[in-house]
Image (cartoon, rainbow, N blue to C red):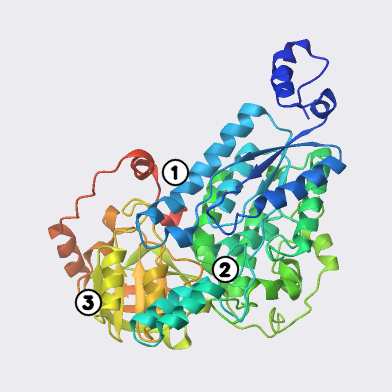
Amino acid sequence: MNNRLQLEDLSNAPKRALMKAMGYTDGQMARPLVGIVNSFNEIVPGHIHLQNISRAVKDGVLTSGGTPIEFNTIAICDGLAMGHEGMKYSLPSRELIADSIECMVRAHRFDALVFIPNCDKIIPGMLLAAARLDLPCLFMSGGPMLSTDGTDLNTVFEAVGAYHSGKLSEDALRCLEDTACPGCGSCSGMFTANSMNCLCEALGMALPGNGSVPAVYAKRLRLAKSAGEAVMKLLENNLRPSDILTAKALRNALTVDMALGCSTNSVLHLFALAHELGLDISLDMVNEISEKTPNLCRLAPAGVHHVQDLDAAGGVYALMSELAKRSLLCEDALMVPGVPLAQALKAHKVTDSSVIRPIDDPYAISGGLAVLFGNLAPDGAVVKRSAVKDSMLRFTGTARAFDTEEDAVAAIYAGNIRPGDVLVIRYEGPAGGPGMREMLSPTSAIVGMGLDESVALITDGRFSGATRGAAIGHVSPEAAAGGPIAYVRDGDKIKIDIPSHSLELLVTGEELESRRAAAVLPERRELRGYLKRYVERVSSADKGAVVI
């Protein structure tokens, strides 16, 4: 602990004077200074309550002899940003979050950190910062929203499609609008936010329950107090992310990802974390792990259960205890209490096998995600296999190509997309979008229109964790980089074979090269501000869409 404002060092008098201007005492400054990195704001439902979480964390730090000092970072609600220009800023905000935290921590020299995220890009942004700063730290999320009557935000998105197709009345849609999101927390299914909060446990960076205890439970506040106490123990033992975030931790996270059926976005974020850590990871590795990891959970959108049900069934640690029965985890990986995973799992078991299936009776013998390769995606594409209907795992359809999400959605609602079509939405990649927008609006429209068993969607953009159906994203190289997806024409046949990890445009190599030679890629509109800088430095999706 060398970052404190040493009372005996008179040269630090000006710094202590500034601290005293805020009311800090000599006694407070003599204790370890613990940064509470809070993403509270009043525009994101997953973050509206984070002041309460922060207060509980501070209580834990105080009772364990530290001085908590809070500062904030930004958070974007993907649901509110969906379907318009705002979504272009969602993924890029991940890098801004990491950079802003780096600035605050390096400038003010904290001894330890507790990160309080909850929604999609905030968690990985904070993980990047934690890896970069390498101070004793842990994660304490705000927890998931409750689901009532089995509905969630995705239900509302899909209901819009049902309304447009005449299958749902306006009154029924407005009723869902009023009830589907009953209170604070990250959206209640195994969407991106809850995926990443659960994976923080698998990585060893959060206490058991971080990803699953509902936001409104008193148990969440008790867990937050425990997190404040735990960070002081990490500081005492000098246990840092470099001790925890190892290659073994990444493998464990990918394994849990496959067993849980996490969002496709988890691949982007784990790859970005690996890049920050200097660890080698590939999309082939994702398939390798997926093929030997049974899918034990099917939470919404893949099934009827929600994250509150996962918690009641024992949570992430209970799921890991099932995986351990087949030695699928690196059990010597360190967890934030400072003990190996094998020891940490001893107190945890599955209490509801309908939510977390036994390792010998899984939903599927392979994991929830799959990476596809072929002439349409030479560098890979990602699909949430567990959320695809069996009838769509192998599918050959007719291409309908669109250069923007908005044009595709308009075509769906106009009834111009028919059974047997494959929607291709391009120029929505990391650089081409820019920002790799989520395609929840078109995928929900497809489901709502009753087309999810007869229409597939392929994009160089990405998907919300709430997306279900044959939705294949992260196509690399992206269209803006001259990837093959740029040369798809209406009427082309596309063959999808998820079990074989294949995605093929059924045209000859000669024809594809001819199109490439003759093509003139659309001019990118003039960008300003942050997006202009982002486009200049962002990598492809298969590399994690990191800024390099």
Q: Where is residue 500 in the image (x, y as percent from the top left)?
A: 44, 78
Label annotation for residue 492: 3
What's under tag 1, amino acid-wise? Answer: Val
Secondary structure state at the residue bearing disc 1 = loop
Q: How far apart are labels 2 and 3 at the CA level? A: 31 Å
Question: Badge 2 local density, few (<14 within 10 Å), some, or many (20+)?
Answer: many
Residue at the limit of the structure toward the front, as seen here = 171
Q: Is residue 546 left or right of residue 149?
A: left
Quarter of the image with the C terminus in it: top left
> Residue 320, position in %: x, y?
72, 68
Residue in front for this viewpoint, 269 or 222: 222
Element at label 3: loop
Spot occupied by residue 157 in the image (x, y as percentages of width and height): 44, 73
Question: Label 3: few (<14), some or many (≥20) within 10 Å?
Answer: some
Would residue 537 be visible to someone looking at this image? yes
* Residue 368, visible in the rendered structure: no
Question: What residue would you read off at disc 1?
Answer: 547
Q: Which residue sits at x=55%, y=42%?
A: 98
Taking depth in this image into account, of 252 and 427 the one nearest to the observer is: 427
Which mark is drawn over residue 59?
A: none
Quadrant (top left/top right/bottom left/bottom right) for the N terminus: top right
Residue, x 44% and y 77% (percent of image)?
Answer: 158
Q: Earlier in the sequence, mark 1 or mark 3?
A: 3
Name which quarter of the figure residue 485 lies in. bottom left
Between disc 2 and disc 3, whose residue precedes? 2
| Vertical side of 342 occupied by 280: above or below | above
Residue 262: assigned label: 2
Instruction: Tell me how far mark 1 sits from mark 3, CA to CA.
Output: 34 Å
